[in-house]
Image (cartoon, rainbow, N blue to C red):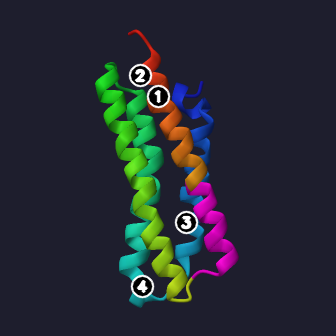
Amino acid sequence: MPFVFEKLLVYQKAISFADNICTLTRDLPRSYFFLANQLNRAALSIAANIAEGNGRFTKADRRNFFGIARGSVQECVPLLELAARQGLLESKGHEQLKADLEEIAKMISGLINGLERRKT
């Protein structure tokens, strides 16, 4: 039986994004290890914080972890920009990954706004 958060579309998209980043960074030159490492950590942090937030009981705790997830989305943006500027990422791939991040960010904001509307 899956955990409740595994049914969330935003979690599924965040895991897919992290998986895409793993694939992208797998073959980067060793001289870009710092960038690959930070990008992988930030990408995984999105899904991990959505999952952890869903495991919390208080609204404040959930909001905090969802906020961290949204911050990790923002962290990925300059990392992808640098990868593109260094020629490690094609323009089309860069645009798609940024579009994925925008969608995930909006969905996380929806999670946070949904918490605010709940009475308990």
Asked if the residue at tag 1 contacts the one at tag 4, i.e. Cβ–Cβ closer than 8 Å, the answer is no
Which of the image's four quarters has the C terminus? top left
The residue to which callout 2 is attached is 116
Closer mark to the observer between disc 4 and disc 2: 2
Asked if the residue at tag 4 contacts the one at tag 3, i.e. Cβ–Cβ closer than 8 Å, the answer is no
Separation (CA) of disc 2 from disc 1: 5 Å
Which of the image's four quarters has the N terminus? top right
Considering only order in the chain, which callout, 4 or 3, is on the residue closer to the N terminus?
A: 3
The residue to which callout 3 is attached is 21
- Residue 25 to residue 47: above or below: below
Residue at point 31%, 19% (across, down): 58
Percent coordinates x, y for residue 38 in the rendering: 37, 69
The residue to which callout 4 is attached is 32
Percent coordinates x, y for residue 40 in the rendering: 45, 64
Separation (CA) of disc 3 from disc 2: 31 Å
Asked if the residue at tag 3 contacts the one at tag 1, i.e. Cβ–Cβ closer than 8 Å, the answer is no
Q: Report the span colored magenta.
A: 89-101
Mark sitting on residue 113 = 1
Separation (CA) of disc 4 from disc 1: 37 Å
Amino acid at pointer 2: Glu
Amino acid at pointer 1: Asn
Asked if the residue at tag 2 contacts the one at tag 4, i.e. Cβ–Cβ closer than 8 Å, the answer is no
